[in-house]
Amino acid sequence: MSAPYQTSLDLRTPETAEGDAAKGLKDAKEALGFVPNMYGAMANSPGVLTTYQHGYAKLRQESGFSAQEQEVVFLTISVANDCGYCRAAHGTIADNMSKVPREVTDAILAGKPAPDDKLGALQRFVQVMFDTRGKPEPSDVEAFKVAGFSERHVLEVILALAVKTLSNYTNHIFHTTVDDAFAGRS
C-alpha cells in the first residue's frame, strides 16, 4: 500500500490568506494567541475555513450539548476518522477546558466505551451515526433519547460530523503537524 496523498499547499497565515480566510485566521490568532496549523491548512480554501469556523461556533454555542458532551462528540468522530491532529486538540480541550473525566477521554482515545452512562450513550450514538452514514435504526435513536438526549441532538450530531469531516479530512491531506499547545495528547 502506498503512502496517503499529501498536498503541496503551504499553511496560510493572516498575511497570506485570501478574503474571508484572512479574517478567520486573524480572529483565531486574536482569540487563541496563535493560528492553529489546521486553520492555516484550511485557509487555502476560504470556504472550508469559514464553513468550519461557523459550524464549529454554532455547535459550541447553540447545540444544547454541555462542554463535556461536545468533546465526547468531537473525540468520537476524530477517533473514527483516525485524525491524530484532532485527537490531540480535542483531548487537550477535554482535559483542560471542558473538564471531561480523564478516564472518559482516555477510553474514547483508545477506541473503548466511555465509562459513564450518559457520555457512553452519546459516544455510542455518534459512532452509530458515523458507521451508518446517518441512517440510525429507530432503536438507536430511542436509546439516545432514553439517555437524556433529544431528536434535536440528532441534528447537532450531524452538524458535528460535517464540521469534523472538514477538519479531519483537511488534516489527512496536509499531514498537519500537531501544535505545541496540543502536543500533550498526541
Image (spheres, grey):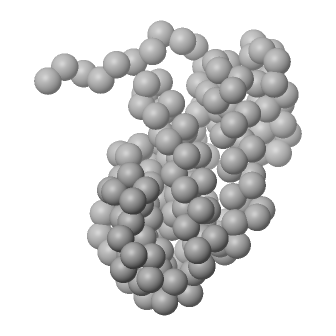
One can see residue 76 in this view: yes
Q: Is residue 89 left or right of residue 46?
A: left
In the image, farthest residue toward the left = 1
Q: Residue at x 30, y 23 (%)?
A: 4
- Residue 3, quarter of the rendered image: top left
Give the total number of marks visible in the rendering.
0
One can see residue 79 in this view: no
Quadrant (top left/top right/bottom left/bottom right) for the N terminus: top left
As drawn, 89 above or below 105: above
Q: Residue at x 29, y 70 (%)?
A: 112
Residue 159 position within the rendered picture, expressed as x and y whole percent measured from the top left: 60, 53
In the image, farthest residue toward the front = 138
Residue 32 position within the rendered picture, expressed as x and y whole percent measured from the top left: 77, 45
As drawn, 140 above or below 36: below
Q: Residue at x 68, y 50 (%)?
A: 56
Residue 120 position within the rendered picture, expressed as x and y whole percent measured from the top left: 42, 79
Q: Nearer the viewer, residue 164 or 17?
A: 164
As drawn, 172 above or below 115: above
Q: Nearer the viewer, residue 156 or 13?
A: 156
